[in-house]
Amino acid sequence: MLSHDELDKIREEREVFVTWRSYSRHVVAEMLEACAVCGTIREKVQLTPCHWCGDTYICKEGICVQLHQAEMHAAVAFWTW
């Protein structure tokens, strides 16, 4: 049988783990974003925000930026390439 001290340690470890898990989800969610074109989930540093859309991120490398500009902002796409 476990003593009261051992049970208290187990409860404390569980509380710390549950608290860390609930906060870590929010931290990870702030670091990740999905590309609006291809849907790939990447770190925000690998994505670039669209200048004309509010909260839209696009892959920095590849053709996602050109595809987004051509589909969503056709009037200004010619001037940004």
Image (cartoon, rainbow, N blue to C red):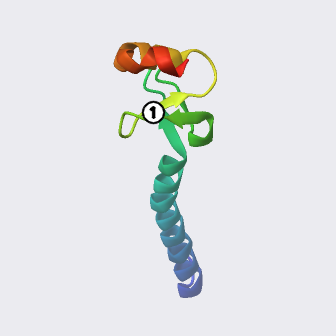
Residue at disc 1, secondary structure:
loop
Q: Amino acid at mark 1?
A: Cys
Q: Residue at x 62, y 35 (%)?
A: 46
Image coords of residue 53 (percent x, y): 36, 34
From what the image shows, is residue 21 above or below residue 35?
below
Quarter of the image with the N terminus in it? bottom right
Camera-side residue: 22 or 53? 53
Camera-side residue: 62 or 51? 51
Q: Residue at x 49, y 50 (%)?
A: 30
Q: Residue at x 45, y 17 (%)?
A: 77
Image coords of residue 20 (percent x, y): 52, 64
From what the image shows, is residue 56 above or below residue 62?
below
Quarter of the image with the C terminus in it? top right
Camera-side residue: 8 or 68? 68
From what the image shows, is residue 52 above or below residue 9?
above
Residue extending farthest front: 79
Please give the residue where the numbered disc 1 appears in the rendered image: 50
Image coords of residue 10 (percent x, y): 55, 73
Q: Quadrant of residue 60?
A: top right
Camera-side residue: 57 or 10? 57
